[in-house]
Amino acid sequence: MNHIEKVKDKWSRGECCIGTAASLTDAAVSELIGQAGYDFIWLDCEHSALSLSDVLNHVRAVRGAGAATFVRVPSNDPVVMKPYLEIHPAGIIVPRITSVEDAEQAVVSFRYPPRGTRGVGPSRGVEFGEISLPNYLANVDHQMMLIIQIEHI
């Protein structure tokens, strides 16, 4: 659904994935990037004015164009991260990781129990009921990627 398998497949063959960043609110930009053949688009919610609604529209547009969407969330706060996770992009990038504890917090915020603390309430991830919750929970770790951005020695 979110085209992460295309990125992972290229990586498994040792191929490079080509992508670019976007911070404009118009999702047509992301759609054009996907249609131009890019593998992914990276939405920066840490340093831009993109709203959650903007991100949702970008993710929809990029999915339709056959590319993956990575979203850099505004912070490592689990409450802030959760709505971005529920949009079910190909990956979440967590900024300002400065310690082992920060990295651990990002991981447990990203994962569902028993491996994490993320609350269960998916809608897009289960394709609005098309996928059973048990099936979704068994496979979600392979459907989304967590990327931590280490920003301190």
Image (spheres, grey):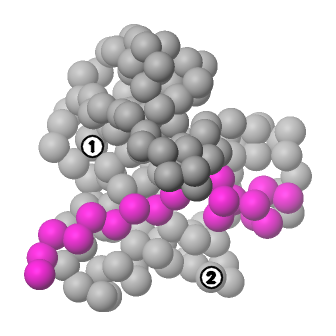
Q: Which mark is residue 130?
A: none
Label 2 sits on what residue type?
Arg
Q: Residue at x 41, y 67 (%)?
A: 78
- On the image, the x and y values in percent for residue 112 come to 63, 72
> How many callouts does the rendering have?
2
Taking 96 as reference, is 134 left or right?
Answer: right
Q: Residue furthest left?
A: 153
- Tag 1 or tag 2, which sits nearer the N-term? 1
Locate the C terminus by quadrant. bottom left
Viewer-proximal residue among 7 and 78? 7
Q: Is residue 53 above or below residue 15?
A: above
Residue at the spot of label 2: 115
- On the image, the x and y values in percent for residue 114 come to 68, 83
Query: Which element is circle 1 on?
Result: loop
Q: Residue at x 68, y 36 (%)?
A: 1
Q: Is residue 53 visible?
A: no
Q: Quadrant of residue 119?
A: bottom right
Q: Residue furthest front?
A: 14
Label 1 sits on what residue type?
Cys
Q: Which mark is residue 45?
A: 1
Report, in whole angstroms, how far the alpha carbon at label 2 lies from the one at label 1. Answer: 26 Å
Q: Quadrant of residue 66?
A: top right
Residue range in magenta is 135-153
Q: Residue at x 40, y 83 (%)?
A: 104
- On the image, the x and y values in percent for residue 80 come to 37, 58
Q: Is residue 116 visible?
A: yes
- On the image, the x and y values in percent for residue 82 come to 48, 57
Viewer-proximal residue among 92 and 76? 92
Query: Which element is circle 2 on?
Result: loop
Q: How many C-alpha atoms fall within 10 Å of the one at disc 1: few (<14), some, or many (≥20)?
A: many
Q: Residue at x 86, y 39 (%)?
A: 130
